Image (cartoon, coloured by chain):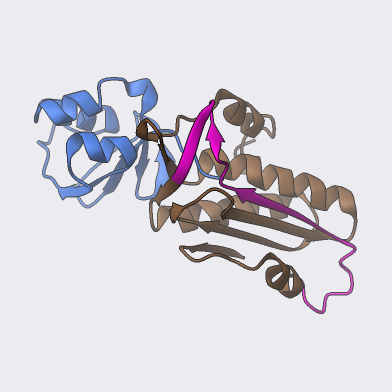
Chain colours: A brown, B blue
Amino acid sequence: MIRVQREDFDVGAELARLGQGNRAIGGVCTFVGLVRDMSDDEKVSAMTLEHYSGMTEKALAEIEEEARARWPLKDSLIIHRYGRLEPGDRIVLVATASAHRAAAFESCQFLVDWLKTRAPFWKREEGEEGARWVESRAEDEKAAAGWASDRKKE
Amino acid sequence: MRILYFAWLRERIGLAEEEVAPPPEVTDVRGLVEWCCRRGRGYAAAFADPSRIRVAVNQEAVGLDHPVGKGDEVAFFPPMTGG
């Protein structure tokens, strides 16, 4: 399931709902992304996430579908927030549920790596020197590429 | 054709979206960018470095050679920085 929302989410409540009643689930892996108060040695006071409504939902659904084709997942969840956030605020939740831990761990990392470079979000940080758009990082591109291209295109 | 701009492209061009009717010789994304650059200084500044621009046609990420035509939704934006 995917959700794109302005509001915060309750990690405990979301995990309780994930795969509810499915006794074949042996492990759930969770990633929660937070707003940091530092970026490249510069203090960050707030961050605004802009996104491409419509394409965002489509891209996240495709990424989730890709993970479920690659690993035997019993359930999965991606929640991504947009709007103005402050240090310590939650940005994203990725959770994967599987019979065994390897699939849950691997697919969770895959989802985070891919959504960073494939879901149309852009971060604008506010700091002491004013506001600036966050540049994409070569390491993020590399991490996403490490999972190879779309299975469909292979 | 509808064009959307995001992040610093939106700021440099001064628009979030617009309806355009490019001439018939504009058949792909590359041609559309070249046509846009001739429309004003804001566009030329925004599209100055193609390596920093990504594009989607009808909400699918595509390359510069992808065809565009009447009725398409084309979006220009910097590399994504979500997560």
Q: Is residue A139 left or right of residue B57?
A: right
Residue drawn at x 9%, y 29% is: B40
Quadrant of the drawing holding the C terminus of chain A: top right
Residue drawn at x 82%, y 79% is: A21
Q: How many marks?
A: 0
Viewer-nearest residue: A130 or B40: A130
| Residue A34 seen by the camera | yes
Quadrant of the drawing holding the N terminus of chain A: bottom right
Q: Is residue B43 above or below residue A81?
A: above
Quadrant of the rendered image containing residue A11 = bottom right
The image position of residue A96, as x and y in percent, is: 75, 57
Q: Is residue A118 left or right of residue B44?
A: right
Q: Is residue A20 left or right of residue A60?
A: right
Given the current orientation, which residue lies at the most extreme front position? A128
Q: Is residue A90 magenta?
A: no
User: Which range is magenta?
Assistant: A19-46
Q: Is residue A90 left or right of residue A119?
A: right
| Residue B2 seen by the camera | no
Residue drawn at x 66%, y 31% is: A143
Q: Is residue A38 magenta?
A: yes
Quadrant of the rendered image containing residue A77 = bottom right
The image position of residue B63, as x and y in percent, is: 39, 31
Residue drawn at x 21%, y 32% is: B32
Q: Is residue A14 above or below residue B27?
A: below
The image position of residue B23, as x and y in percent, is: 9, 36
